[in-house]
Image (spheres, coloured by chain):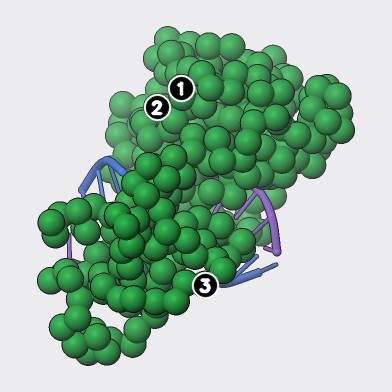
Chain colours: A green, B blue, C purple
DNA sequence: GACACGTGGAT
DNA sequence: TATCCAAGTGT
């Protein structure tokens, strides 16, 4: 691992911030101003989600719920509708819990330190540091996937970034480098760098503004950084989706309030061991495939009369369009529609 | 400290 | 097609 001198650190900060001020994505809506509410909403949406995906969601969310008070007092259904399709839905629920906490418990007074911000539900070590540095100028590194990748290459840090224990290694390495005057810009510049020149695949380090600080590039070992152990591939699961129609309505089932797609409405889903179990009763020729991070669902539509359970109800199109439905359910509805 | 937790894009 | 990736957190 490389150790930088004080002079190198100063040169790096200047190079990075000069580039950021000239080439950074200053037009991103959460960079228009640094109100903590705007930054909080953006940071939660951006967790494990790309900027281009977030943009339209962010605009709608801020337009409908422009203040932390609006979010705190909104019906949860409205918040989930605004989040529909964005995934990781506990983020939306925790975001509203955080807003309620700030409005009701803290009387609208924001926590300003990264330690205090981390008390908010859904706000962990990365997000708290991001908000603290961007909105409150705290000199603290926001260690996200970009920071891992960028600094693993710049400093040749070989700690496995898939391992939780590595976080403090990166934190300690980056802390003395964070710009003491513009910590928020510094952190955002690292993220812009990580999503432009210093990408995970096919980095363009030879044109990077910080190429002269890149030890891995200098030593021609950039492909070895960051070190990251592989994840498991998704487990295959087969289901039938029960299609039960009554008076133009379809039967839906509410999922349990914990676990995958908690509390969301889908067609009743019954696990099957193989397609042989339903021998030709299915409506679709090929299964509907939906892949989660850790699950691969293969779903067959089957028309079936059922006694409906307490967690089930018949919904008209008008009913289900006002609900926030998970993407897999939208796929099932479309597949059913396409059969007609 | 693993694993659960969504979705869409890139290669 | 398969695999990995993208501004992580909660349990």
**Both marks 1 and 3 on one chain:** yes
Q: Which residue is mark 2?
A: A56
**Both marks 2 and 1 on one chain:** yes
Q: CA distance from mark 2 to mark 1?
A: 5 Å
Q: To which quarter of the image does residue A267 belong?
A: bottom left
Q: Chain of mark 1?
A: A
Q: What secondary structure is marked by label 2? A: helix
* Along the line of sight, the residue nearer the viewer: A23 or A305: A305
Q: Chain of mark 2?
A: A
Q: What secondary structure is marked by label 3? A: loop
Q: Nearer the viewer, mark 1 or mark 3?
A: 3
Q: Position of residue A253 (x, y in %)?
A: 47, 64
Q: Which residue is mark 1?
A: A59
Q: Chain of mark 3?
A: A
Can residue A153 be seen here? no
Q: CA distance from mark 3 to mark 2?
A: 37 Å
- Seen at 40% across and 27% down, the residue is A56
Q: Are marks 2 and 1 in contact (CB under 8 Å)?
A: yes
Q: Is residue A70 above or below residue A22?
A: below
Q: Nearer the viewer, mark 3 or mark 2?
A: 3
- Seen at 79% across and 30% down, the residue is A102
* Along the line of sight, the residue nearer the viewer: A188 or A285: A285
Q: Residues within 10 Å of mark 1 (few under 14, many from 20)?
A: some
The numbered mark at residue A309 is 3
Q: Are marks 3 and 2 in contact (CB under 8 Å)?
A: no
- Seen at 30% across and 55% down, the residue is A248
Q: To which quarter of the image does residue A55 belong?
A: top left
């Amino acid at each position: 691992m490389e150790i930088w001198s004080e002079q190198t650190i100063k040169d790096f900060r200047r190079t990075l911030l000069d580039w950021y001020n000239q080439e950074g994505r200053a037009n991103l809506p959460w960079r228009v101003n640094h109100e903590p509410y705007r930054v909080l909403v953006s940071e939660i949406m951006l967790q494990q989600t790309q900027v281009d995906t977030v943009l339209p969601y962010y605009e709608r969310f801020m337009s409908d719920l422009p203040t932390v008070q609006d979010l705190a007092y909104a019906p949860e259904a409205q918040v989930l509708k605004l989040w529909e399709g964005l995934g990781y839905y506990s983020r939306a629920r925790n975001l509203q819990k955080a807003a309620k906490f700030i409005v009701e418990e803290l009387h609208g007074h924001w926590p300003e330190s990264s330690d205090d911000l981390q008390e908010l539900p859904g706000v962990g070590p990365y997000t708290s540091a991001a908000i603290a540095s961007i909105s409150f100028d705290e000199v603290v590194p926001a260690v996200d996937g970009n920071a891992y990748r960028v600094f693993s290459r710049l400093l040749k840090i070989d700690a496995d970034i898939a391992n939780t224990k590595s976080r403090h290694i990166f934190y300690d390495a980056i802390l003395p480098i964070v710009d003491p005057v513009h910590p928020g810009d510094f952190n955002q510049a690292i993220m812009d760098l990580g999503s432009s020149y210093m990408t995970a695949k096919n980095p363009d380090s030879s044109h990077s503004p910080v190429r002269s600080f890149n030890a891995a590039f200098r030593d021609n070992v950039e492909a070895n950084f960051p070190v990251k152990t592989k994840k498991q591939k998704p487990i295959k699961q087969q289901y039938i989706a029960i299609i039960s129609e009554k008076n133009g309505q379809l039967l839906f089932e509410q999922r349990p309030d914990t676990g995958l797609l908690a509390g969301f409405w889908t067609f009743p889903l019954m696990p099957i061991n193989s397609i042989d179990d339903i021998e030709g009763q299915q409506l679709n020729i090929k299964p509907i495939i939906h892949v989660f991070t850790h699950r691969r669902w293969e779903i067959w539509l089957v028309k079936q009369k059922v006694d409906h359970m307490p967690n089930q109800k018949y919904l008209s199109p008008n009913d289900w369009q006002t609900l926030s439905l998970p993407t897999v359910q939208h796929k099932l509805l479309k597949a059913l529609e396409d059969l007609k």
